[in-house]
Amino acid sequence: MTEQPTIPFNRTAPEGRELDYLRQSVEGGHTSASGPFSRRAAAILQEETGAEVLLTTSCTTALELSAMLLDLGPDDTVVVPSFTFTTSALAFARQGARILFCDIEPDTLGLDPKHLAELLDDTVKAVVIVHYAGIACDVDGIRSVLADRPDVAVVEDAAHGLFGRWRGEPLGSLGRFASLSFHETKNFVCGEGGALLLNDHRDLAPARVHYDKGTDRQAFFLGQVDKYSWRDTGSSFGLSDTLAAYLLAQLEQAESIQARRRHVFETYREGLADDAAELGFRLPVVPDDCDPAFHLFYVLMPDHATRTRVMDLMREDGVSTTFHYVPLHDSDGGRRFSARAVECPVTSDVSGRLMRLPFFNGLTGDELERVMSSFLRATREAT
């Protein structure tokens, strides 16, 4: 067993004026949603993505809000990649839709356009795309498949994608809706938080009603009605302004944070590349038209047994690693809410082999060297 301190998988820390802004929020007296810090944080996100922005309590609730706006029912289906977090599907099942699980393609680990084409039928109302690790999925291929289906909405689960780009376009600007996450594991954090991005101005008014507990409260504040009242379904989606204060301080440091995360990503990729072929692992694929958001770094191990052994050896060495998603298509919930059974062989294969290395803003050069040395040593022993 190592006597060195354990390198955690993730570690968060203030990056700028977080504590100052928290104090200002508390002393200012507006700690609920839609306050001054919320407006400032939303303005930064709008400048980056070009979208209308509603800050939410989580990425999950942002997806739930998009599902409400799609007016889904039991006769509707939503295509969701099987290799993603539960709420990418749950948000739409919760509104009554059935889920069609789609396989991923093996390069970016994003939704596979070829499988999407096989799944499309007249019941499909939306397609959820995920930019895994902050690397854009095959957007061009997906758009080609949907070219003659303008009735199908594209929803970006961009929880990994803020400040990433595809062909120069910001991730989060490529669908009708997009969701962001500010969970403590993401690039920019406030403990728990998210945002819904609206890329069609026609969705803004109904979104505000759902966002404000089913009322036209925002229209009242804008002087569009003389009083506000209950209009539709909705919920309490708004992010506390105190959490938005913390988020604002993080977003103000975007250039610095992203530069450090780029350094971590590139250090791993360059430091492990020479051994990949010999030891049988694969590094992330970044297409030429993608600028990553540098959310995480993964390796695809030769097989499940090797991954398990390497993770065990690295844990003994004081280095924390983790795997990622259990395929949704063969989970209990997936089978319950799916429109029909599907096979997603790439998802099943990747899920059994993918391993994530420690990745956070404050990783030091010494820690990076230690992670890579531990990984290579463990992989040689395991293979």
Image: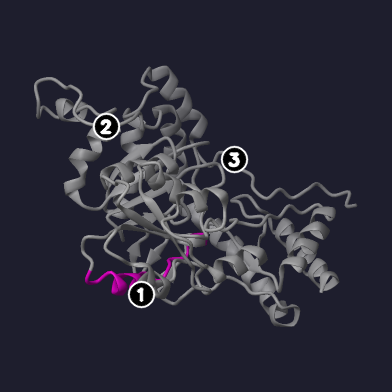
- Quote the CA–CA distance across marks 3 and 1: 39 Å
Where is residue 232 shown, x and y percent of the image? 22, 31
- Helix, strand or loop under label 3: loop
Where is residue 327 shown, x and y percent of the image? 57, 58
Please say if 342 is above or below 64.
below
- Quote the CA–CA distance across marks 1 and 2: 35 Å
Is residue 140 magenta-colored?
A: yes
Q: Are marks 1 and 2 in contact (CB under 8 Å)?
A: no
Q: Residue 13: which disc?
A: 3
Q: Residue 233: which disc?
A: 2
Q: Of residues 289 and 154, which is closer to you in this image?
A: 154
Q: Magenta residues?
A: 133-148
Q: In terms of image quadrants, where is residue 296?
A: bottom right
Nearer mark to the viewer, of 1 and 2: 2
Q: Amino acid at mark 3?
A: Ala
Where is residue 355 shown, x and y percent of the image? 67, 62
- Helix, strand or loop under label 2: loop
- Helix, strand or loop under label 1: helix
In the picture of the structure, the residue carrying the numbered disc 1 is 141
* Residue sitting at x 50%, y 40%: 16
Q: Amino acid at mark 1?
A: Gly
* Residue sitting at x 21%, y 46%: 203
* Residue sitting at x 29%, y 46%: 72
Q: Residue 213: which disc?
A: none
Mark toward the start of the polypeptide (1 vs 2): 1
